[in-house]
Image (cartoon, rainbow, N blue to C red):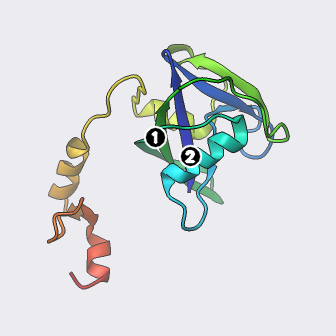
Amino acid sequence: MGVGVILLREGRVLLGKRKYGSGKGQWAFPGGHLELDESVEACAIRELKEETGLDLLEPRMGPFTNDIFDPESHYITLYVIVDWTGGEPRNRESNKCEGWEWSDWDNLREPLFLPLQNLLKQGFDPRKPLRKLRAIRRPLRKLGAIRRSPFQTPPVPTKALNLYGI
């Protein structure tokens, strides 16, 4: 599971050029792997600090992408959106990243890392308010893929409910 940090500054986002592994030479958001027992928000705060030295305030949960790099590598990337509050990014992991640059959302640097490509295919724009998930939930509910739990929590996948005999 990956976590990407969409850091916004006056219509621009922070991108770093990857140095190794899948996505070498491609531009990506700050982020990394979600550690065991770590919240998505805590991961975003940790990764942004480790990679750029910047502090993250008031993170907002964003969209997700389903990223299949090859038959052996499949990730779900969860995005956290945050507004820039000051300071300039420093390249604190120069072994992993060539450097950080602010990029205009309408004219992003190329080539883009696969999760960011997939995010763009969804039509996501971090400058616009996130739509409610109802538009996604209704068709899934009609197909029987999700249903409300008896406790009125957010929708839970039907298979997960059946695992617990509900």
Q: Nearer the viewer, residue 163 or 84?
A: 84
Gap in angstroms between the C-alphas marked 1 and 2: 8 Å
Q: Residue furthest right?
A: 95
First in sequence, mark 1 or 2: give its number: 2
* Residue bearing mark 2: 44
Question: Label 2 sits on what residue type?
Answer: Ala
Please tell me which residue is depicted at 68% across the width and 23% down the height of the picture. Answer: 88
Q: Please tell me the numbered disc located at residue 41.
A: none
Question: Label 1 sits on what residue type?
Answer: Pro
Please tell me which residue is depicted at 54% across the width and 67% down the height of the picture. Answer: 37
Please tell me which residue is depicted at 64% across the width and 46% down the height of the picture. Answer: 47
Q: Relative to residue 1, is residue 56 depicted above or below?
A: above
Q: Relative to residue 70, is residue 97 depicted above or below?
A: above
Callout 1 crowding tier (Cα within 10 Å): few <14, some 14–19, many ≥20:
some
Q: Are marks 1 and 2 in contact (CB under 8 Å)?
A: yes
Q: Is residue 145 left or right of residue 123?
A: left
* Residue bearing mark 1: 59
Q: Position of residue 155 (x, y in %)?
A: 24, 60
